[in-house]
Image (cartoon, helix red, strand yellow):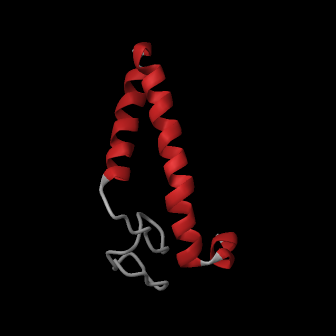
Amino acid sequence: MSWNRTSNMKNANCCHACERPAIPSSSSAPLADHAQLRALSAEVGSGKLDNLATFSEALIAHVRFEEREVFETAEEALGRDYLDAG
């Protein structure tokens, strides 16, 4: 996927409800992580506390991944000025 700083909602490279380009991903793992985290959160939220440690570990691992990969990629692609202006 290529970067296009002028991406908008009509462009497949745009994220959700904003006009910023989406971060390209080489795999679907981050989206699968989000689905797993939502499911675990719902279970813990409904009182199934035996999954609390699993949720915590999965959340920590995913946040570390985003800090290492996603945020670094965003800084490189968008530039510091663009992100600071947000």
Decide which of 14, 10 is in the foreground and name it: 14
Quadrant of residue 9 in the image? bottom left
- Residue 50 higher or lower than 1, as above or below: above
Is residue 45 something that shows in the picture?
no
The quarter in which the C terminus is drawn is: bottom right
Please report the residue visible at 49 percent of the width from the left and 50 percent of the height from the top.
65
For the image, the number of numbered tags is 0
Is residue 35 something that shows in the picture?
yes
Please report the residue visible at 41 percent of the width from the left and 63 percent of the height from the top.
16
- Residue 23 higher or lower than 63, as above or below: below
The quarter in which the N terminus is drawn is: bottom left
Q: Position of residue 21 (x, y in %)?
A: 45, 74
Please report the residue visible at 59 percent of the width from the left and 71 percent of the height from the top.
75
Residue farthest front in this picture: 68
Q: Position of residue 8 (x, y in %)?
A: 42, 79
Q: Position of residue 11 (x, y in %)?
A: 34, 79
Please report the residue visible at 34 percent of the width from the left and 32 percent of the height from the top.
39
Quadrant of residue 13 in the image? bottom left
Q: Position of residue 43 (x, y in %)?
A: 37, 23
- In the image, taking residue 19 as reference, residue 34 lies left or right, namely left
